[in-house]
Image (spheres, rainbow, N blue to C red):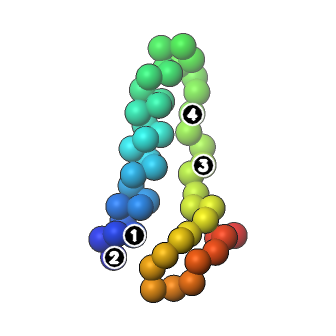
Amino acid sequence: MRAKLLICIGPQVALLTVYDMCKAVDRGMTITEAKLMEKHGGKSRNGVVV
């Protein structure tokens, strides 16, 4: 469970970092969607998440 949580949080932190760097250029930009597109490893099978 902890690894899944970290997998979800890591990309969000990266997006917020990019947003923080870019907000000086465009204060109106927004992050509207972030979703898992592919999964590899773990107990369940690998594949594309739809």
The residue carrying mark 4 is 30
Side of 16 where 36 appears, left or right: right
Placement of 20 over or under 35, stated as above or below: above
Q: Position of residue 28 (x, y in %)?
A: 57, 23
Query: Residue 4 has which mark?
Result: 1
For the residues bearing labels 4 and 1, Cβ distance under 8 angstroms = no
Q: Looking at the image, which is closer to me, 42 or 22?
A: 42
The C terminus lies in quadrant: bottom right
- First reached walking from the N terminus: tag 2 or tag 4: 2
Q: Where, by quadrant of the figure, is residue 20 drawn?
A: top left
- Please, which residue is most extreme toward the top here? 25
What residue is pinned by disc 3? 33
The residues tagged by marks 4 and 1 sit, at their Cα atoms, a distance apart of: 25 Å
Choose the circle earlier in sequence order: 3 or 1.
Answer: 1
- Which residue is at 64% across, 70% downward? 49
Question: The disc labelled 3 sits on which kind of residue?
Answer: Glu
Residues at marks 2 and 3 touching, judged by CB atoms closer than 8 Å: no
* Mark in front: 3 vs 1: 1
Quarter residue 9 falls in: bottom left
Q: Which mark is residue 14?
A: none
Q: CA distance from mark 2 to mark 1?
A: 5 Å
Q: Which residue is mark 2?
A: 1
Q: In what element is the residue under mark 1?
A: helix
Crowd band around label 2 with a 10 angstrom C-alpha radius: few (<14), some (14–19), many (20+): few
Say how many tags the image has: 4
Q: Is residue 21 above or below residue 49?
A: above
Q: CA distance from mark 3 to mark 1?
A: 19 Å
Q: Which amino acid is tagged 1? A: Lys
